[in-house]
Amino acid sequence: MPIRFLTAGESHGPELNIIVDGIPAGLELRAEDINKDLKRRQCGYGRGGRMKIEKDQVIFTGGVRNGKALGGPISVRIINNDYKNWSDVMSPERIDANKYESKFVSKARPGHADLSGAIKYNHEDIRNVLERSSARETTSRVVAGAICKIYLQQLGIEILSYVLRIGKVGIDIEQLSSDYKDLFLKAESSEVRCPDLKASEDMKKAIDEARSRGDTVGGLTQVVALGLPVGIGSYTHWDKRLNGKIAGVLMSVHTVKSVEIGLGKKVSELYGSEVHDQIYIDPKWDSKKLRYMRKTNNAGGIEGGMSNGQPIVCTVATKPIPTLIKPLHSVDIKEKTDTQAHFERSDICVVPAAGVVLEAMLAYVLADLIAEKFGGDSIVELKNNYDNYLELCYQR
C-alpha cells in the first residue's frame, strides 16, 4: 500500500490540515516527536517575524489512538496563531469588501506564483494566490515527513541535512567529511545549520549584509539518507527510477532550483575512471551486511535508478526568496501599470529551514517506495518482510 499525503490551508487562514494515508498499524507516534521538526523548521538565522508568532504544534484528530497508528488515514491539524489578525481578510464567509480592502494585492512579485497564478485561476486579488503558494505550506510537509521519518527509523533508515552555502559563503564540498551523522550533529548546534563553525559566522554576516541592503539570500543544502538497502527503485521503467522520484519531490519544495545527486554536475568535468565507484569484496563481510563495498560514493547511492546500499546524497540549491524589503520592478494587474512589487512581512534567508523541509520530502518518497516494495498492514508485518529481504541481499 503506498503512502500518500494531502495538505490544506492558507498562510493566514484558521489552520493547516494534513492527512497521511498508508502508515501501518502499530507505529508509535507522539506529538512531541513531530513538534521537534516543526520547531527546527521555524529556527534559523534570517527568519522573519512570523516565526515569533507561530508556535506550531500538531493535534492528532484521527488515525492515532493511545500513541499508536491504527492503520487508517492519520489526520492532523495545526492552528495558525496569526489568524486572529486576519480573521476578516481570510474569512470563509462572504463579508463587506471594505473590511479587507487594505489587504487586497494587485502588485505581483517577480519570482513568486503571483502573476502566473492570478492569470491561471482568474483571480483579481493576488492574495488568493499567495496565501496557498506561500512557504507556510511547508509546515504541513514537515508534519507528513516527520511521520515518514518515524516509519523509516523502524527499519534503521535515517534522514539528515546540513547547509553548505549561504550566498557567496560556503564550505568546500570536496573536503567535506563522509561522517554524515557528525556533520548533522554539528549543524544542529549552528544558527544557520552549517557544520563548520567559522563558515557559520561568515554566513550570518552574509545574511546581515543582505538585510542591510533590503535584499534576500539563497544557498546550498545537502540532504542524506543513511541505511537504505540495495534495490529501492527500479531500472525497468523511467517513472520507477529512484533518482527521478527523489529529484521530483525535492524540486517541488518552495525556492528549490536545482537538485544534484552524488557528484552532480561535476561528472561532466571528469573521466569515467574518476566518476564511477569501483566495487570490491568486503574483507570484513559477515552475514549481517552486504558482501560488496565501495571506497567512494560519487554516484550518491544510486545506480541504474536503484539504491546501491550506500548513503543517498543530494545537494540542493535554493534561490533567494522573492519578497524583498526593497521591492523589484513589476506590474499592477488591476491598474495595468508598471509599479514596484508587493511587500509583506518576510524572511531574509530560509536556507537553514529549507533543509528540514527537504528532509521531510526525502523521507516521504523513500517511505512510499519502502511501503510499495515491502507492504504490511502492521508495523510487525512490515519489519518481517523487510528483514527477509535483507537476509536475501546479504547472502548474494
Image (tube, rainbow, N blue to C red):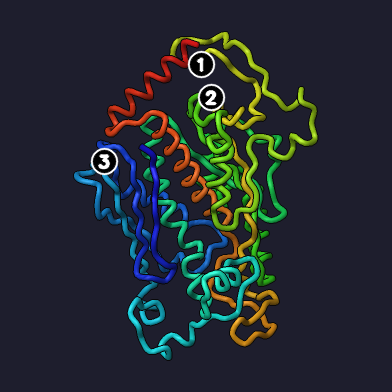
Distance between the alpha carbons at the discs numbered 1 and 3: 32 Å
Callout 2 touching callout 1 (CB < 8 Å): yes
Distance between the alpha carbons at the discs numbered 2 and 1: 8 Å
Residue 230, compared with residue 367, is above or below; it is above
Q: Is residue 140 left or right of residue 191?
A: left
Query: Which quadrant, please, contains the N terminus?
Result: top left
The image quarter in which residue 76 lies: bottom left
Residue 288, compared with residue 130, is above or below; it is above
Rendered residue at 43%/57% (across/down):
139
Q: Is residue 282 left or right of residue 158?
A: right
Callout 3 touching callout 2 (CB < 8 Å): no
Which of labels 1 and 3 is toward the front?
Answer: 3
Q: Reading the chain from its start, which is encountered first: label 3 or label 2?
A: 3
Residue 290: image tag: 1
Distance between the alpha carbons at the discs numbered 3 and 2: 29 Å
Q: Reading the chain from its start, which is encountered first: label 1 or label 3?
A: 3
Please say whether residue 229 is visible from this viewpoint. Answer: yes
Residue type at tag 1: Leu
Residue 249, compared with residue 91, is above or below; it is above
Rendered residue at 48%/74% (across/down):
128
Residue topped by disc 2 = 309
**Could you say where residue 276 lies in the image, as x and y percent from the top left?**
70, 24
